[in-house]
Amino acid sequence: MDNFFSIRTVTWEGDAVRMIDQSALPIKLTYVRYTRSEQIADAIRSMVVRGAPAIGVAAAMGLALAAARSRTTRLPDFMKEMEAAASLLRGTRPTAVNLFWGIDRVMSVAASASTVQSAREAVSSEVKAMEEEDFQVNKRLGRNGADLIKNGDTVLTQCNAGALATVGYGTALGVVRAAVEQGKLVKVLVPETRPALQGARLTAFELVRDRIACTLISDTAVGLMMSRGRVDCAIVGADRITKDGYVFNKIGTYQEAVLAKRHGIPFYPAAPRSSFDLERTYDRVTIEERGAEEVVEIRGRRIAPKGIPVANPAFDMTPPELVTAMITDRGLVKPPYDENIARLIA
Ligand code: MRU
């Protein structure tokens, strides 16, 4: 089973970035090709590419495009252009720390070069390495978490923390894939994940494509499913895990965690090193507020009266006391999280 969802979400082609247009899924599997950093910024903002690790790598590649297109031969001017592109990309989405991790990593590679040409080459090889690394890190993370899933288990997830949210293989769904690779029968319960429907559109798409058993539910069915014994564990992704162990992830994750505690069900966020924010505590994180149209419309069709006030927070925050363990590429992180994040992740 080595060819699980073998297509890559984001790839570096040397002078262009190729990515799956996730806004068209599951109706059409199409690719877009971008040659300018501004196009990458638009793609991140409009969620043509989404998912914390995927936007981290995409933003890094956006900077590599800025480097490739620069016409200057003076290093200080080159760095000014790179800073401008970095600032545009930093402003796209505030919550996933991977975005800033990807940008900082490329900027520090550029800053240590001694000529424009060597900076361009170093940045280009760095983003190719990041693409490959993301895939390998997710495979490792998947293996580290697979033993938490028993044969016959049903795993509840949230949003899409799969191959489409990464370069490939996925984080939460990477753990499921690794358990299936071990020969276990695993079923995934997929909440639709209003308002942008990443569960119904993307998680369902990749699981069906990989022939992994799954059932789509409405977000509001989670509590009932748990109370009926239909969930063995919850595995979700993370956009940012702060140094004090708070997990920021797609809106709806917190209520899953609360319900999991109520029903004695283990709750596991799965995240690579690049999703950890070792500088901040929970109170210094911005939760993205997205446009009202995502809530008053479903796929372009109006469902609420005109003029209704709307709140649309895209992420929520799960406190450490609701987390059973964190699955990472460095192994399992268990409580107390502040100590163990510092020990295992830093
Ligand atoms: O708004 P999105 O679709 O970018 O949100 C994605 C999530 O919340 C994922 O769970 C998270 O990025 C982890 S993906 C491995």
Image (tube, rainbow, N blue to C red):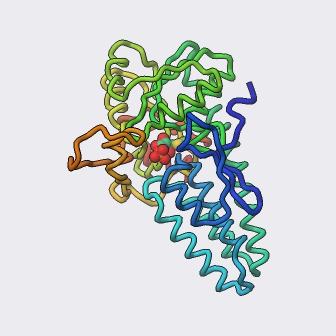
87 horizontally vs 120: left or right: left
What x and y, as percent, mark residue 308? 21, 47
Q: Nearer the viewer, residue 120 or 227?
A: 120
Identify the image quadrant of the C terminus.
bottom right
Q: Is residue 156 visible?
A: yes
Q: Residue at x 36, y 31 (%)?
A: 256
Q: Nearer the viewer, residue 178 or 47?
A: 47
Q: Is residue 224 left or right of residue 212?
A: left
Q: Residue 46, position in %: x, y? A: 49, 53
Residue 72 vertical position relative to residue 275 in the rendered view, above or below = below
The image quarter containing residue 148 is top right
Horizontally, is 299 left or right of 32 in the view? left
At a point 36% along the width and 32% down the height, the residue shown is: 257
Res. 332 visible in picture: no
* Image location of residue 10, percent across then percent down: 66, 49
- Give the residue at x 42% y 28%: 191
Q: How many discs mark residues in the rendered view? A: 0
Quadrant position of the N terminus in the picture: top right
Asked whether 67 or 16 is in front, the reply is 16
Does residue 206 sit above or below 336 in this rendering? above
Q: Residue at x 45, y 33 (%)?
A: 158
Name the image quarter holding residue 149. Answer: top right
Percent x, y for residue 177? 63, 27
Work out whether 82 lies above or below 134.
below
Picture quadrant where residue 260 is located: top left
